[in-house]
Amino acid sequence: MARYGVGRSTLEKWFRERAENGHPEPDGAGGRTLTWDADAWHAWYTAREASPAAPEGLLSREGLAARHGLSKHALKELWAARETNGHPQPALVKGKALYWDGDAWAAWYRALPTGPEPDPDALVTLAEAGRLLGLSPGSVTVYASRPPKGWPAPVEEVALGGGRVRRLYRRDDVLSYRRAQDR
């Protein structure tokens, strides 16, 4: 766990799924503790980490995000609403990883009804900016005190109770920042 920075639950999951993932069999046991040949396990782990993220012709969420210019958050929302929007089922599931046929997904996405185009001058909170960027809510909160290079300045600051301040950003400025990060 310490050497590879992998948690116990992940290691246990890999072992349980060894028939699908090729995880090596244990070479011994000491009580309830299983042991592996260090070289064999390292070779398996190294090959696993070096293998391509998605099988040929299939795209993960990251691949779909890159190809269609969407945030991971937007993709998660589309997947969560699959009952109502007809989101295609994954072509392959490997553990927790989902992979879609890129062409079939693109055809489905193009056929989605589009709503009105959002106003680029609309003001968004820091939390909404984080969602536009596909960031977790906790990770974007530090942008107010330690903005990353290129982060836009707030357009408006509203004083809240208890000395707190709500910062509002232009939606288009946030999206421009995202486009700059994607380059």
Image (cartoon, helix red, strand yellow):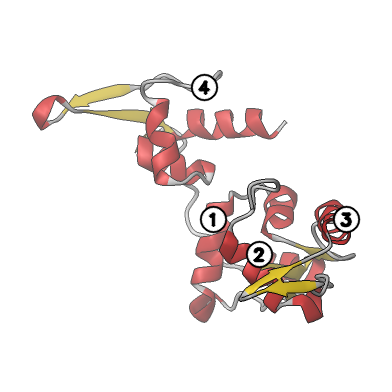
Task: Please identify the quadrant where the C terminus is shown.
Answer: top right
Q: List the residue tagged with mark 3.
A: 39
- Residue drawn at x 46%, y 46% is 136
Mark closer to the chain start, 4 or 3: 3
Left-right relation of 105 to 23: left
Marks 1 and 4: which is nearer the front?
A: 4
Residue 40, quarter of the rendered image: bottom right
Q: List the residue tagged with mark 1.
A: 74
- Residue drawn at x 79%, y 65% is 36
Marks 2 and 3: which is nearer the front?
A: 3
Mark closer to the chain start, 1 or 4: 1
- Residue drawn at x 50%, y 70% is 80
For mark 3, give the secondary structure. helix
Q: Amino acid at mark 3?
A: Asp
Contact between labelled residues 4 and 1, with CB atoms less than 8 Å apart: no
Q: List the residue tagged with mark 4.
A: 148
Residue 74, quarter of the rendered image: bottom right
What is the C-alpha distance between the residues marked 3 and 1? 41 Å
Marks 3 and 1: which is nearer the front?
A: 3
Q: Amino acid at mark 1?
A: Ala
Marks 2 and 1: which is nearer the front?
A: 2
What is the C-alpha distance between the residues marked 4 and 3? 41 Å
Q: List the residue tagged with mark 2.
A: 11
Mark closer to the chain start, 2 or 3: 2
For mark 1, give the secondary structure. helix
Marks 4 and 3: which is nearer the front?
A: 3
